[in-house]
Image (tube, grey):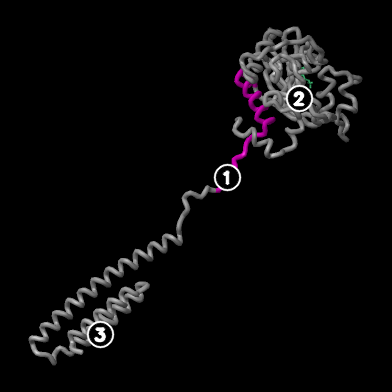
Amino acid sequence: MNLIDQIKALKEEALRLIDKAVDLEKLNSVRVEFLGKKGKLKAILKTLGKLSPEERKQVGQLANTVKEELEERIKQKEEELKKQALAEELKKNKVDITLPHSWIEVGSAHPVISTMFEIVETFVAMGFSVAQGPEVEKEAYNFDMLNIPPDHPARDMQDTFFINKEGYVLRTHTSPVQIRAMLTQKPPISIVAPGRVYRKDADPTHSPMFHQIEGLLVDEGITFRDLKGILKIFLETTFGKDIPIRFRPSYFPFTEPSAEVDIGCTVCKGSGCRVCKDTGWLEILGCGMVDPNVFDAVGIDWERYTGFAFGLGVERIAMLKYQINDIRLLFDNNMKFNHQFKGIR
Ligand code: DAH
């Protein structure tokens, strides 16, 4: 085979191997094999000396174009392989941007707690401050100083959780916080006292532990009108501007006169249903003017000061507001139930 044919054959072989190269490493070994210092093309060119000048020129030119062609092809192939490698790399590390992200569960207040906060906020907006008292309370504050006599049915073992500490009970209402406020502050006094209370009760509408908010306002010249006005604002804020409100005479040992407040039934809107026992009204809280006996017990001059007090059950208000028909749902801590109230506050 003459040199020209050898070079052509070499070119064909090199092109074939370049095409076949599967990676950059293989491609480089093809380059070294054919175009390297000790490569096949150089080996052929070493024999040029034996040729006539005419042939030498011809073969030299051919060798040069073959060299250039091969270099060009190697360059192209190199780019192809690099692209391919990058594509594979991207495929391997592919980030699926359509995948949903992991959720951080955001908690929310329990409906009883959010209802309690809302009510407290309404009174704070009217200038009341927030007071607190202990859940293990002095019997004297829970009963005696609130003018509840020793033989009153509320003091019965049936209703009250007595504890093994003489003179203390689990408070049965938040009213003792009134006593604490009046013992430690001078009028004018205006407080709301939210908190847990305990009674031996358990049925669809009663729980042995529940929440109340007590309110107390004492100053010179406070009348029943002030009580009505404040409670009207509270009830309209909680149940809406058009809520019907009714004051009904009642009795509580610590207030005189006393009243119970009803709102128009939130379920049937007054036409009569199971929830309002066909009356169209729902009892919502107890209230009245502070009894002079209570003022005496805490040493406030009832000739100079008057005041009103009220107490309400938070669970009952939450149940009416969100149409919950069994109080036990509020204490089961079933997350499916609780999550319905997400975002309410
Ligand atoms: N303490 C009462 C109860 O638990 C509620 C109550 C009624 C509180 C009338 C008051 C009030 O301050 O004036 O049923």
Q: Residue at x 62, y 39 (%)?
A: 107
Residue type (three-letter) at the residue carrying disc 2 = Thr
Residue at the far bottom in the pictured view: 50
Residue bounds of the magenta highlight = 102-128
Q: Is residue 228 left or right of residue 151?
A: left
Residue type (three-letter) at the residue carrying disc 3 = Lys
Q: Is residue 25 visible?
A: yes
Q: Which residue is mark 1?
A: 104
Using the image as rendered, state which of residue 115 and residue 324 is in the foreground. Answer: 324
Residue at the far right in the pictured view: 151
Q: Quadrant of the N terminus?
A: bottom left
Q: Which mark is residue 73?
A: none
Q: Secondary structure at mark 3?
A: helix
Q: Earlier in the sequence, mark 1 or mark 3?
A: 3
Q: Earlier in the sequence, mark 1 or mark 2?
A: 1
Q: Which residue is mark 3?
A: 40
Marks 3/2: CA–CA distance: 103 Å
Ligand 1 closer than 8 Å to the CB at disc 2? yes
Question: Residue 253, position in %: x, y?
Answer: 83, 15
Choose top left, top right, bottom left or bottom right for residue 138: top right
**Other-residue count near label 1 (Cα within 10 Å), few / some / many at <14 / 14–19 / ≥20:** few
Q: Which mark is residue 174?
A: 2
Q: Residue at x 45, y 57 (%)?
A: 94
Ligand 1 closer than 8 Å to the CB at disc 3? no
Choose top left, top right, bottom left or bottom right for residue 70: bottom left
In this rendering, which labeled residue sits more in front, label 1 or label 2? 1
Q: How many marks?
A: 3
Does residue 241 lie above or below 314 as drawn?
above
